[in-house]
Image (tube, rainbow, N blue to C red):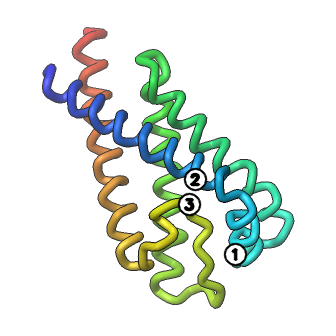
């Protein structure tokens, strides 16, 4: 059972690094991020909210993952973020949007849509694995 707990912790560390990097990249390149959010196939009002909500939510997920008491909330927050991003990237990759702007920060901005989709799904799979292992670990400790 310890191995499953370690796997959940390792994935949590990877997610902390991912969310921290993604949020900080967006904030450091904020003018670029704001322009790219304006090019998204969403209403401008939503874009104005998301330019602050996305990095804030990513940082919140990273902070939640830092502490044992909030790790499960962080794993669920990561699951929802990764699911939303994967759906968006998938819809873009398969041509459902006429606009193809990437508001990602850092190296993620340079990934093609296919690579981005594979990356997101792989991280989402790791996130789901960590959630399952975390829940099993908690069940062992509470029984």
- Tell me whether circle 3 and circle 2 mark residues in contact (CB < 8 Å): yes
Check disc 2 and report the residue beneath it: 25
Q: Which callout, 2 or 1, points at the residue further toward the start of the chain?
A: 2
Which residue is under mark 3? 105
Quarter of the image holding residue 128? top left
Residue 102: image location, x then y, percent: 58, 73
- Check residue 90 in the rendering and tell me which mark sits there, or answer none: none
Image: 113 above or below 107 = below
Report how far apart the C-alphas of labels 2 and 1 lie in the structure: 18 Å
Give the percent coordinates (x, y) of residue 10: 27, 34
Callout 1: few (<14), some (14-19), or many (20+) C-alpha neighbours within 10 Å? some
- Secondary structure beneath dot 3 equals loop
Residue 123, x across and y down, in percent = 34, 53
Q: Position of residue 80 (x, y in %)?
A: 51, 49
The correct choice, above or below, for 88 with respect to 55 in the image is: below
Helix, strand or loop for disc 2? helix
Query: Who is closer to the viewer here, 23 or 122?
Result: 23
Q: Quadrant of the C terminus?
A: top left
Task: State the CA–CA distance, disc 3 to disc 2.
Answer: 5 Å
Secondary structure beneath dot 1 equals: loop
User: Where on the picture, by quarter, is residue 36?
Assistant: bottom right
Give the CA distance from mark 1 to mark 3: 15 Å
Mark 2 Cα within 10 Å, few/some/many (few <14, many 20+)? some
The residue tagged 1 is 40
Q: Residue at x 47, y 73 (%)?
A: 110
Residue 99 against residue 14 in the figure, above or below: below
């Amino acid at each position: 059972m310890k191995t499953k707990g370690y796997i959940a912790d390792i994935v949590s560390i990877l997610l902390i690094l991912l969310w921290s990097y993604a949020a900080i990249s967006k904030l450091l390149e904020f003018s670029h991020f704001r322009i790219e959010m304006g090019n998204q196939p969403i209403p401008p009002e939503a874009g104005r909210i998301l330019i602050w909500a996305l990095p804030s939510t990513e940082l919140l997920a990273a902070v939640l993952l830092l502490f044992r008491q909030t790790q499960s909330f962080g794993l669920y927050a990561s699951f929802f973020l990764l699911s939303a991003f994967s759906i968006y990237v998938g819809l873009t990759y398969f041509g459902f949007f006429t606009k193809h702007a990437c508001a990602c920060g850092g190296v993620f901005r340079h990934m093609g849509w296919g690579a981005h989709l594979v990356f997101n799904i792989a991280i989402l799979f790791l996130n789901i694995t960590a959630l399952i292992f975390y829940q099993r670990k908690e069940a062992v400790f509470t029984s």
